[in-house]
Image (cartoon, rainbow, N blue to C red):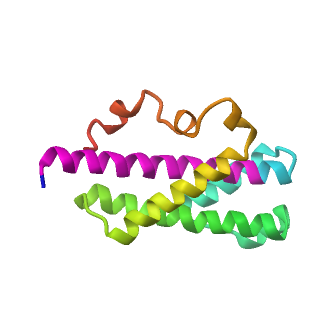
Amino acid sequence: MFSWFKRKAKKEKLKVLYQNDLAIMGFIGHVVGSVNHMDFDLVGEVQGMIITGNIDSELLSQSLGGKAAEIVESMAVTHKKNGEIGERLMEDGGISHEEFEFLFAVNKDMRQLYQSMPLSRIKSFDENHAPPGGWEMYYSGRV
């Protein structure tokens, strides 16, 4: 395969990984904030659990209630798998076809969820889920 094509494919996968990570964390913040009237300490604590992978199901259940806790735990699993795929992509540049499909399915789902949020009327998904400094700065050193 041409090297320029490999770089382009890797850039696209990195973009989807980044957007998935940001969208999942944003959606979790939205769910937690909605249930607890914007308790920013709890939002930060839950997002911290997601990042470290140390999910306290009991705390989630007590703080959020049944369905919201289930949603957050499900998103945590998706976030973890997204991160594992990202690590493999950065190590050797290759991921399986199933992993590739997973990334794009999550991205599609996150885009659909985003459309139901008020912020979608102000900024598109791509505008809101872009790195500071733009994509070229993000890609430098990664591709």
**Number of numbered discs overlaid on the protein picture:** 0
* Residue 55 visible in the shown view: no
Q: Is residue 70 above or below residue 124?
A: below
In this picture, residue 17 sits left or right of residue 60: left
The reply, left or right, for residue 78 in relation to residue 68 is left
Q: Nearer the viewer, residue 94 or 76?
A: 94
Magenta span dominant secondary structure:
helix
Name the residue at the left extreme. Answer: 2
Choose top left, top right, bottom left or bottom right for residue 136. Answer: top left
Front residue of 16/90: it is 16
Q: Which quadrant, please, contains the N terminus?
A: bottom left
Q: Is residue 135 magenta?
A: no
Q: Residue at x 76, y 53 (%)?
A: 31
Instruction: Kindly identify the residue that appears in the image at 69 percent across and 69 percent down.
Output: 56
* Stretch in magenta: 2-31
From the top left corner, tell me how far across and down residue 78 is, in percent: 55, 65
**Depicted 45 relative to depicted 40: above or below:** below
Residue 114 lies, in percent from the top left, at 65, 46
> Where is residue 82 drawn, in percent x and y?
47, 61
Question: Residue 8 lies in what quarter of the image?
Answer: top left
